Image: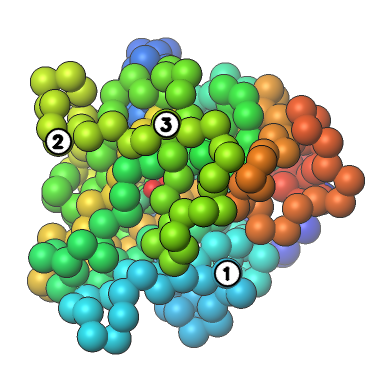
Amino acid sequence: MKVPMKKEARVRGEPIDISENTIEEFENNGVIVLRNVVEEYWLSKLATAIEKALVWQGEFAELYTTVEDPGLFFNDFYMWQRIPEFREWAFYGPGAEIAHQIMRSRQVNFFYDQIFLKEPGLEAHDSGVTPWHQDTSYMAVDGWQFCSTWVSLDALPRESTVQYVSGSHKWKDNIQPFDKFTDGTEYQGGNFVPVPDFEAEPERYDILQFDIEPGDCLVFQGRVVHRGAGNTSQKCRRRAIANRWVGDNATYAVRKPPAEFPHIVPKGVRHGAPMREYSEDFPKVWPRD
Ligand SMILES: O=C(O)CCC(=O)C(=O)O
């Protein structure tokens, strides 16, 4: 897909320059935090975009809380396809350049975007937590060059952000996916192992988590095991947006049982085909020519 250039849309901010040490840290741990790489222009665009997403929800949007629960946990996907601010963020924000450098990938294609909105009050409620998982168990992507960027519009203490099992992106096993809305039978027959009990053996695992300020960006590899904390605040929102990026060696994985993402499978997909072959569905965003 050729990215349509709107007149007002342009690349914002300084060029990104990620150091070799930071790239190596990402390669070793499966996650890094980049400080102050998202400028105010984008934060205010995304604040509007989140409000629009709540009104114009997508066909796959999910509410993890009921009307009786405290707080609210809302997830939505593919917002770039219907909300201009998300499209502009995906195509012209810093994410593509970050993904290009951190994955050491010549080209970057945009896979999809996702909202994790956790309103205050969820703290004492399990429904505010995104359980331990590995993105690749849900996603039709194989290959090392697959990562996500995750930004929050709100300042968050580490207890409210994402926790990562350092180095788990190098594990050979595929972690059993979880779906709150089903009994899990749709994943039967998949080549999965149960989620380890990280809390039971804390000395075995190095769990990384970071305080986050608006402007910071988490970047994590598609196989790293992670979970999203609930919102520990009774007052502040937790408005987070994740974008998924694929690079040169990422290939389309036709999984059995089928992967959840993408919900709409590109026409004529072949297992093992480079993701960049499907740029109608997963637009090329880097280089920006
Ligand atoms: O923010 C969260 O709760 C979880 C984020 C996450 O799991 C992801 O972006 O893959």
Which residue is painted at 45% across and 79% down in the image? 54
In the rendered image, is residue 185 in sight? yes
7 lies above or below 165:
below
Q: Label 2: few (<14), some or many (≥20) within 10 Å?
A: few
Q: Which of 184 and 270 is in front in this view?
A: 184
Q: Is residue 4 left or right of residue 54?
A: right
Rendering quarter of residue 143 = top right
Residue 191: x and y in percent read 54, 31
Name which residue type carries label 3: Val
Disc number placed over residue 193 in the picture, else none = 3
Q: Earlier in the sequence, mark 1 or mark 3?
A: 1
86 lies above or below 229:
below
Looking at this view, name the residue that lies furthest to the right. Answer: 268
Q: Is residue 253 left or right of residue 16?
A: right
Rendering quarter of residue 107 = top right
In the rendered image, is residue 36 in sight? no
| Pointer 2 residue | 199
**Mark-to-mark CA distance, 1 and 2:** 32 Å
Name which residue type carries label 2: Glu
Quadrant (top left, top right, bottom left, bottom right) of the C terminus: top right
Q: Earlier in the sequence, mark 2 or mark 3?
A: 3
29 lies above or below 149:
above
Name which residue type carries label 1: Phe
Residue 120: x and y in percent read 19, 72
Which residue is painted at 49% across and 79% down in the image? 52
Q: Which mark's residue is nearer the viewer, 1 or 2? A: 2
Q: What element carries label 1?
A: loop
Which residue is painted at 58% across and 74% down in the image? 58
Residue 83: x and y in percent read 60, 71
Q: What element carries label 2?
A: loop
Q: Which colour scheme is used?
A: rainbow
